Image (cartoon, rainbow, N blue to C red):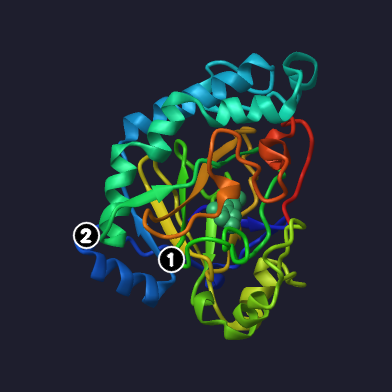
Amino acid sequence: MATCMVGGRPVPDALLGELRDSSELLSTSEEFQSRMAEDGYVFLRGALDAGEIMAAREEALERLAEVDEIKRPAVEGWATGTSRRKELVGDLGEFWQSVSEGPNLRTATHGAKMRSILDALFGEPSIGQDYIFLRVGVPGRSTDLHYDYPFFSRGSKRIVTVWFPVGEVSVVQGPLMIVEGSHHYSDLIDLNQTLNYDSTASPRVALEDDAITFAQKRGTRLLTTHFQPGDIVVFGMTTLHGSLDNHSPENRVRVSVDVRYQPASDPKDERYFGTKPGGTTGVGYGELNGAKPLDQPWHVR
Ligand SMILES: O=C(O)CCC(=O)C(=O)O
Ligand SMILES: [Fe+2]
């Protein structure tokens, strides 16, 4: 693997592993459920239509080229280092909602292909949240380790996160990483369950260590891969994950989406459904890091 970085430090090889590709194995919901229980995630290579994913990429990045954040051809994803988003778009939240609701992007997140995968995985009809997390990561941006519980936990107990790259994402561009075996860390998971998930304050178990130190202390590995358009990772609310650093020497952005799916018959967390979903804090798409112009640094804690 090319150099994987966390917090500006290279991850030692001994702490790195490849996500296990389950695409050959899964034909029934029982197989999916048992693989989820075993690994805490399921990685399916080439499960979505690569052409549809690339159309979504082009659509989203073209919107960012229009505000001078991405060079043309936009689909290449080269960051300009500047932005005119604030001058040009008016409301940042509304702009981000409109980018997040691009028709090609919605085909990728909620189209027939995605639905059929999730229906098969649950063994019953599924539904995806309307509120999606489109993440365009410039070099310097990364996501700290966290569990998705207690986010998204007011409705279905069977809810899962679906993460997929929108285009190719090499390890240099800061893809998703999963902490191997972290769905068995009952100390952290139990602590998580005590958090007040009705809060709008984005509650989170704060880990003091970065991913390298954490993996060293727990004697585990960080699992990732060189992602291709069409790949998806499905994981549960009690699987610890984050991202590697984007340290692309070409200043290429990392584009991904994460969206939650659940059985359609389960109760829904209404914050994430509807035409104007409020999201975790109630302010809608404006609360997302994606809504911030690309020339502003951020770090998700
Ligand atoms: O893509 C990332 O940086 C983080 C993704 C994540 O936290 C999620 O999919 O729940
Ligand atoms: Fe997450």
| CA distance for labels 1 and 2 | 24 Å
Tag of residue 243: none
Image quarter (top left, top right, bottom left or bottom right) of the C terminus: bottom right
Q: Residue at x 62, y 18 (%)?
A: 65
In x, y percent, where is residue 43? 37, 58
The residue drawn where x is 47% and y is 37% is 166
Image label count = 2
| Image coords of residue 292 (percent x, y) | 74, 34
Q: Amino acid at mark 1?
A: Arg
* Residue plotted at (52% across, 52% down): 2
Left or right: 92 as drawn, with respect to 255: right
| First reached walking from the N terminus: tag 1 or tag 2 | 2
Say which of 285 and 166 sits in front: 285
* Residue 269 picture quarter: bottom right
Query: 3 or 157: which is nearer to us?
Result: 157
Question: Within 10 Å of the Cα at label 1, are there few (<14), some (14-19), or many (20+) other Cα atoms?
Answer: few
Res 158 label:
1
In the picture shown, does residue 204 fall above or below 181? above
Q: Position of residue 10 (x, y in %)?
A: 65, 60
Look at mark 2 in the image and give the residue it sits on: 24
Using the rendered image of the protein, determine whether residue 47 is visible from the camera's viewpoint: no
